[in-house]
Image: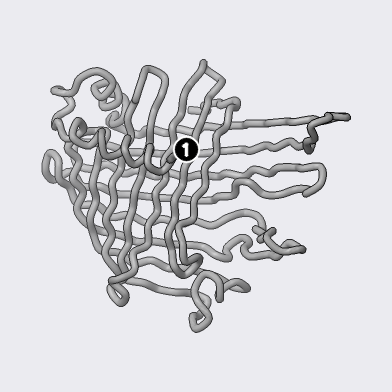
Amino acid sequence: MKRILFFAVFIAMMPFLWAGEAGESKGVYAKAEAEMETEGLNPRMNLFLNFANAGFNNWAAGGESSYSWQVNFDGSIDYSDNDILWINEFVLKYGRSEMQEAGSRKTADEVSFKSRYNRKVWEAIHPYAEISFETQLDSGFDYSGEEPVEISKIMDPAYMRQTAGIAFKPSQVFEVRAGLGFKQTVAGDFADRYIGPDGDFIENKAGASFSFHLNVSLMKNITLKSDLGFFSDFYSADTIDVKWESVITARVNEYINVRFDYVVLYDKNAVYAAQIKDILSVGVVYGFL
């Protein structure tokens, strides 16, 4: 149901976002456009902290005491002028859950960096080049058996991409990108899991990249950011890697945020099924810049 809801929101908004120039936009769209692309250097950094606790003592209906915490540190350094738009984004995310019987388990772990250079050639169409990197900080485990089994760790796996192509941006809140690119998967002890039993420690792929990007204010204090990307390897065109990341953020006041993260991944080298993760959190946010 959640997947259907997100897909419906994403598709339903597209016709409105193709309205064209910022000056013709209405309501929340005009506000989002005015805030997003300011000329010059535009740094932004945010720290988000959340904590949850559940305690049971002689509770007749049963229950297990637990607490969880998560830290998100993200930001961007952008530069814009009449000719170029250069966007640099990073994310550092980590969280754990401590349960009375099950012990400590990881709930969030991400280190990522993305840099995209856009050349403003035409009003809504421009060439771009992008590089990205993603890995994790801590070991990950499979708890399906009697004993936990380690299945990932820092730089095992790690993912890198280089893409160049054309972007179509009819408004400041919506963009479509299409291009050619390279994708590298790096793995060590778990290469069999993320690359394949016949693969090396580094897998290189060349293929076509296609993506949709939405960043819009839904209401006065609620924003939606959604990125849906596809990568098709030239040597196995019947297989398409998919990554869909969506975040809805509701700002309660200057320091309190409610956030819903939803991620869908499909990479047959890792799992022959869609990987889905969703996190609903309430916490404290502080903006450095």
Instruction: Name the residue nearer the viewer: 199 or 41.
Output: 199
Identify the amino acid type marked 1. Answer: Gly
156 relative position to 57: left or right: left
245 relative position to 34: left or right: right
Q: Position of residue 119 (x, y in %)?
A: 21, 47
Quarter of the image with the N terminus in it: top left
Residue highlighted by disc 1: 75
Instruction: Name the residue nearer the viewer: 269 or 74.
Output: 269
Q: Position of residue 180 (x, y in %)?
A: 25, 63
141 relative position to 220: left or right: right
**In the image, is residue 65 above or below residue 229?**
above
Quarter residue 217 falls in: top left
Q: Position of residue 116 (x, y in %)?
A: 33, 49
Quarter residue 208 falls in: bottom left
The residue under the point 62% across, 31% down is 49
The residue under the point 44% across, 40% down is 2
